[in-house]
Amino acid sequence: MTKLLEKALAIVRGLPPAEQDEIAQAMLSLADREAEAEEIDPTHLPDVLESLAQARRREFATDAEVEALFDRLAQLPVLDPREPDEIIGYNEHGLPS
């Protein structure tokens, strides 16, 4: 086990059990080498590839850009009055089911 993973696990041990389970589920999902890859709609592939290239170049949105996006999203109308839990549904780990 690497020192970085040991450090991460030490931090996770201090979290509430529900959060530990959520992180454990995410780790298991990431470590599952036999999991099926998510299919990408061919029309979205150029955008996905460009996003990956931007990440490799460490070109990320600034705090101001993210805040502006959140402000824009907050102005959108509510089209479905249900709570997110009612729309998606979550499992015992707090992940969408």
Image: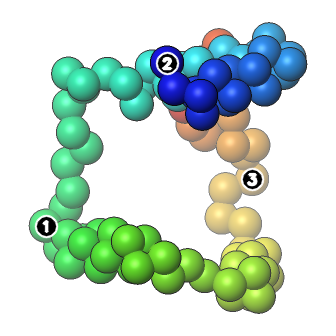
Residue 2: mark in rendering: none
Where does label 3 land, which residue?
Answer: 81
Looking at the rendered structure, the secondary structure element under dot 1 is loop
Is residue 97 visible to us here? no
Q: Could you say where residue 35 lies in the image, as x and y percent from the top left?
A: 24, 25
Do the CB atoms of the residues marked 2 and 3 lie less than 8 Å apart? no
Q: Residues within 10 Å of mark 3 (few under 14, many from 20)?
A: few
Separation of residues labelled 2 and 3 (CA atoms): 46 Å
79 versus 61 height, above or below:
above
Is residue 34 visible to us here? yes
Q: Residues within 10 Å of mark 1 (few under 14, many from 20)?
A: few
Q: Which comes sooner in the sequence, label 2 or label 1? A: 2
Looking at the rendered structure, the secondary structure element under dot 2 is loop
Give amino acid for label 2.
Met
Q: Determine whether, in the image, residue 63 is placed left or right of residue 79.
A: right
Q: Which comes sooner in the sequence, label 2 or label 3? A: 2
Give amino acid for label 1.
Pro
> Which image quadrant is residue 77 in?
bottom right
Where does label 2 land, which residue?
Answer: 1
Q: Determine whether, in the image, residue 56 is placed left or right of residue 38.
A: right
75 versus 35 height, above or below:
below
Image point (21%, 78%), residue name = 46
Which of the pair 80/9 is nearer the observer? Answer: 9
Separation of residues labelled 2 and 1 (CA atoms): 38 Å
> Which image quadrant is residue 49 in?
bottom left
Image point (86%, 19%), residue name = 14
Separation of residues labelled 3 and 1 (CA atoms): 32 Å
Which of the pair 81/44 is nearer the observer? Answer: 44
Q: Nearer the viewer, mark 2 or mark 3?
A: 2
Where does label 1 land, which residue?
Answer: 42
